[in-house]
Image (cartoon, helix red, strand yellow):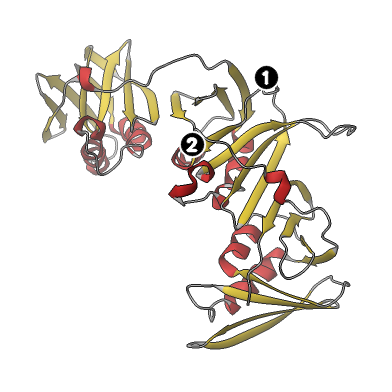
Amino acid sequence: MKITIERAALLRSLGHVQSVVERRNTIPILSNVQLRAENGELSLTATDMDLEIVESVPAEIARPGSATAPAHTLYDIARKLPDGSQVELDATGDLLTLRSGRSQFKLGTLPVQDFPQMAQGDLPHRFELGAADLKMLIDRTKFAISTEETRYYLNGIYIHAAKPKAGSSDPAVLRAVATDGHRLARVEMALPNGAEGIPGVIVPRKTVLEVRKLLDEAADRIEVQLSDTKVRFTFDSITLTSKLIDGTFPDYERVIPAGNDKALEVDPKLFAAAVDRVATISTEKSRAVKLSLDRNVLTLSANSPEAGSATEELEVAYDAAPLEIGFNSRYLLDITGQIEGDGARFMMADPGSPTVVRDVADGSALYVLMPMRV
């Protein structure tokens, strides 16, 4: 294989694919990126066996062929080459020679036939959605993905088509849900054409984060293909295929309380700033902040045996019975950070029951937060 390519194009594509490659690998070939040159294009592939990303980029091909090379090393070299330079890649035998200007690097390669291919298989469900919609679904739920490996079925975002309740005239929606048992995020959008019969799938955390990184540069339409075991995202010249989490997502509807009758409305930005200030005092372990509610006044407080205490008052809209309830301040900040409007509505029942948080101006997202003892 021998090609010439612009440094900027090579760097951008390597940047996309190398982030899939794990830094520590017990299987040496998984540290490599596969380079395939044919028909005026260089195709780069990286995989960790669960997730595969393929990107094509135009290149001048002097000799078609393929090779594998260490992904992170190749990326670091491309990153350090001067702007605007041309890069020549020449693979012969078990060496890849990279030349650019007066620089020359020789990298060891591994046999192309050892590079794992993800079994293709049929992905029968196919639909399109806007990059902004997919971004919204991910951004508003990813903070609630569990990092606890024991409950592996919570280590991703559950995506499914939600049908309206019997007798309701509401349209069906595409819904994304994530929970770690302490908080839950549920976001929905109009159901795209072709998504009506999709199975409920759990997209793994790593896949979610990789797709999210790529969306910042993506064109405005994303094609999604699904089967019971795999998902594929295709846009521009990138195809990302991932295995799904093989597990059953819990019945999240059961944990969304319907009877919470105490409503608090507050400016999310003022509230978040006050929580952040008061939480400076709370212990690193519990991060607890107490909310004391009385008519139209919210008092935030935190106590710590080592650091002392803090209180702050906010004017709010609240006219139910007085209530004291505690929350993890980090979780409060995560949720209020998702609210883009001027009003956050907290629906509470009592100090021991889950609280529902919504954006007053946008009904597409709902958050549930478990209180803590303070």
Q: Do the residues labelled 2 and 1 touch (CB within 8 Å)?
A: no
Left/right of residue 37 with respect to residue 192 in the rendered view: left
Residue 234 lies, in percent from the top left, at 50, 24
Q: Which amino acid does label 1 sit on?
A: Gly
* Rendered image quadrant of residue 350: bottom right
Eyeballing the image, is 164 above or below 310? above
Using a 10 Å C-alpha cutoff, classify the residue at mark 1 as few (fewer than 14 neighbours), some (14 to 19) or many (20 or more): few
Q: Is residue 64 among what the camera can see?
A: yes
Left/right of residue 124 with respect to residue 315 in the rendered view: left
* Quadrant position of the C terminus in the picture: bottom right
Task: Name the residue at 86% across, 32% down.
Answer: 166
Question: Which of the marked residues, 2 or 1, is nearer the chain's N terminus?
Answer: 1
Residue 211 or 328: which is nearer the viewer? Answer: 328
Task: Name the residue at 31% across, 31% down.
Answer: 10
The residue at which mark 1 appears reads as 194
* Rendered image quadrant of residue 279: bottom right
Query: How far is disc 2 from disc 1 in space, using C-alphas?
Result: 21 Å
* Rendered image quadrant of residue 34: top left
Residue 47 or 223: which is nearer the viewer? Answer: 47
Disc ID at residue 211: 2
* Quadrant position of the N terminus in the picture: top left
Residue 66 lies, in percent from the top left, at 22, 17
Residue 14 lies, in percent from the top left, at 32, 34
Task: Name the residue at 69% across, 70% down.
Answer: 270
